[in-house]
Amino acid sequence: MSGSASSSPLPFAIGYGTNGFGDHPLPSALDVLDALGYDAVALTVGYPHLDPFAPGSSQTTERLARRLGRMRDGAGAAVVVETGTRFTLDPWTKHRPTLVDAEAGLRMRYLTRAIDVAATLDARCVSFFSGVLPEDDRPADGWARLVDRLPVLLEEARESGVRLAIEPEPGMLVETVEDALHLRSALGDPDDLGLTVDVGHCLVVEPDGVVGALRAAAPVLANVQLDDMPRTHHEHRPFGEGDLDLPLVLATLAEIDYRGVAAVELPRHSHDAPALARRSLAALRQAWADVVGHPPEATS
């Protein structure tokens, strides 16, 4: 199957997250995605693929930029930088420290390095989350820390020509699109702070479902993550194994004229990565064909 631009008829770039290829060296993962015909890569900065603190990481990133540029028969793959690495910052505690922790210096340095990586790769955005509020802290404490710290990151991003995108996550302080929009408002609605929406998360936490969340985020939507999920809990699943209406999702993205990257997000499925990448792309193309032939009704 060719990796040419014409391989995807969708109006946005279809990608796959490297966190779903954790058992592959990054060059091998890119080879698979290129051979399958993906238009984009969602690159997680951290273990196992790109340690932003390793000696020589800048040179490694420059080599990666050249490799990404050779994808799609030389047209190059679109890139978004993801920062959901689990234990890169603390080998004992997943995701910590976060931006809502009392001490977040290491997270700030990590996100600054992610911005550097994104600038080198000419990435569409750097996607990040707020974090889970520490057990003994008040929500007001977490919000104050976000409002205090994000302007520093936004200034770093502006100087590098990089856009940031905050992702609402179930169980985190910024959990819904409404929360993310509230944060943007508290910061003065900066143009260079967009939103990442994971459509699976919408099934679990969004009161108006996937369609409502995407429509609300549309004016500032910078990044989309695609996965199936049950409505009952936060569990990323392959398409067809949850409650997601995939044609409806794609139709809604087309309706709001989204033109960015929409990347498959299966971080716990590296054991079957090549087969799942193949099946995911086939499912997306079939769902889009269903939309074109029989547009779904926006009823959920």
Image (cartoon, rainbow, N blue to C red):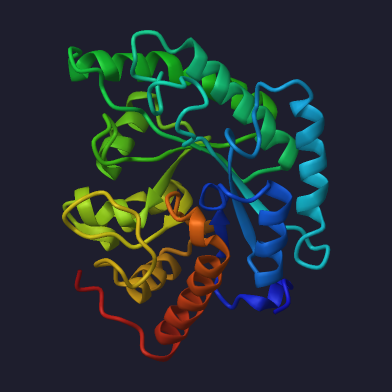
236 lies left or right of 126: left
Q: Quadrant of the N terminus?
A: bottom right
Residue drawn at point x = 71 percent, y = 71 percent:
5
Q: Is residue 166 above or below residue 135?
A: below
Residue drawn at point x = 60 percent, y = 38 percent:
48
Residue drawn at point x = 68 percent, y = 33 percent:
117
Q: Percent from the top left, x then y, of residue 87?
A: 47, 28
223 lies left or right of 144: right
Q: Is residue 138 above or below residue 58?
A: above
Q: Is residue 161 visible?
A: no
Q: Is residue 141 above or below residue 226?
A: above
Instruction: Specify the quadrant of the image occupied by residue 203.
Output: bottom left
Q: Is residue 219 visible?
A: yes
Q: Quadrant of the C terminus?
A: bottom left
176 vs 186, nearest the viewer: 176
183 lies left or right of 116: left
Q: Percent from the top left, x then y, of residue 222?
A: 49, 48
194 lies left or right of 236: right
Q: Percent from the top left, x then y, of residue 216?
A: 31, 52
Instruction: Specify the quadrant of the image occupied by residue 176.
Output: top left
Residue drawn at point x = 16 percent, y = 55 percent:
232
